[in-house]
Amino acid sequence: MSRFVLVVTHTGREDALLASQEVCSQLVEAGITPVMTAEELSDTIAFSSSHVAPNSAVAKIVELGVGAQLEDLEVVMVLGGDGTILKAAEVVRDAATPLLGINLGHVGFLAESERDGLRDAVHRVVEKDYLVKQRLALDVRVFVHGAEVFRTWALNEATVEKSARERMLEVVVEIDKRPLSSFGCDGIVMSTPTGSTAYSFSAGGPIVWPSVEALMLVPLSAHALFARPLVISPNSLLAVEVMQRSAGSGVLWCDGRRSYEMPPGARVEVRRSDIPVQLARFRQGPFTDRLVRKFSLPVSGWRGPDSGSN
């Protein structure tokens, strides 16, 4: 029975294209068919053709939706940073295929391996030697005059931001259909635990361990006495309304990839999605170690618990 692995990369970077060709070569050698989206396959073919010795494995890549369908994929190998992983999550959203990130960017918090571990990562995929972890995702809906006009999802966060730099956004925040507070701000971040190390972190929100099921709400530059980051039940309904008196309109962004304009009176509702995102992992190490590694936190001098103490 044929095996198919989707390869997603940042085709605007030469190092990413070279890495994707290396991955495809190893997959083909192992009898696995590499798959790419039509756009990335076109870029990969063009890149390979521009070299004196084109990569022969490129001819074995099949196009997603033509040579292989979403339901045929067993895993997605993502070569790039967190932005590329979010792009890949969008591609396979309807199939919930596990995502395995190989970091070619900077922090790469969602990635499981680094560039120097690429060959081992392919070997682990070939042997199916990985764990699959579920990550909470968000269901996001926009309403105008009471009617739903837009629906999407997010892995990291959904943000409502002001659309004009010179104008503050006036919003009212609601939790579980009860008003909490209204204020002027630059925006509101509604985050998952996975997104707590992304935009929410930059905005001063708490870092939440992935094993903790919760939603976060973090105001951006709010003009209010009560504008603290909130950690909320994963079963709660979060809502942000752009107030009619707001001088400017807002824009909803989900994972920085999908957007929708929010005029005064528009409302966004965010709740836990019924469909989690699947991440492939090689190890079950403590999240603390991932924080230390990804943020290069100083831990020199730590001696650990004194096993000889009474």
Image (cartoon, helix red, strand yellow):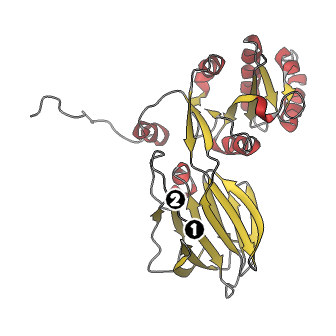
Question: In the rendering, at what x and y percent does residue 299 appear?
Answer: 34, 38
Image position of 77 with respect to 119: above or below: below
Q: Amino acid at mark 2?
A: Leu
On the image, which quarter does residue 15 sit in? top right
Rendered residue at 44%/80% (across/down)? 225
Q: In the drawing, does residue 167 fall left or right of residue 62?
A: left
Q: Closest to the observer: 269 or 112?
A: 269
The residue labelled by disc 1 is: 238
Q: In the drawing, does residue 44 fall left or right of residue 267?
A: right
Question: In the rendering, at what x and y percent does residue 89 appear?
Answer: 69, 43
The residue labelled by disc 2 is: 215
Question: In the rendering, at what x and y percent does residue 83 appear?
Answer: 67, 45
Q: Is residue 249 visible?
A: yes
Q: In the drawing, does residue 154 fall left or right of residue 209?
A: right
Q: Is residue 107 visible?
A: no
Rendered residue at 60%/37% (across/down)? 279
On the image, which quarter does residue 119 sit in? top right
Q: Dot 1: what SS?
A: strand
Residues tagged 1 and 2 counted as in contact (Cβ below 8 A): yes
On the image, which quarter does residue 280 sit in? top right
In which quadrant of the rendered image does the N terminus lie? top right
Q: Dot 2: what SS?
A: strand
Return the disc, 1 or 2, that comes first in the chain's sequence.
Answer: 2
Using a 10 Å C-alpha cutoff, classify the residue at mark 1 as few (fewer than 14 neighbours), some (14 to 19) or many (20 or more): many
Q: Amino acid at mark 1?
A: Leu
Using a 10 Å C-alpha cutoff, classify the residue at mark 2 as few (fewer than 14 neighbours), some (14 to 19) or many (20 or more): many
> How far apart are labels 1 and 2 at the CA level?
9 Å
Rendered residue at 55%/81% (across/down)? 183
Q: Which mark is residue 136?
A: none
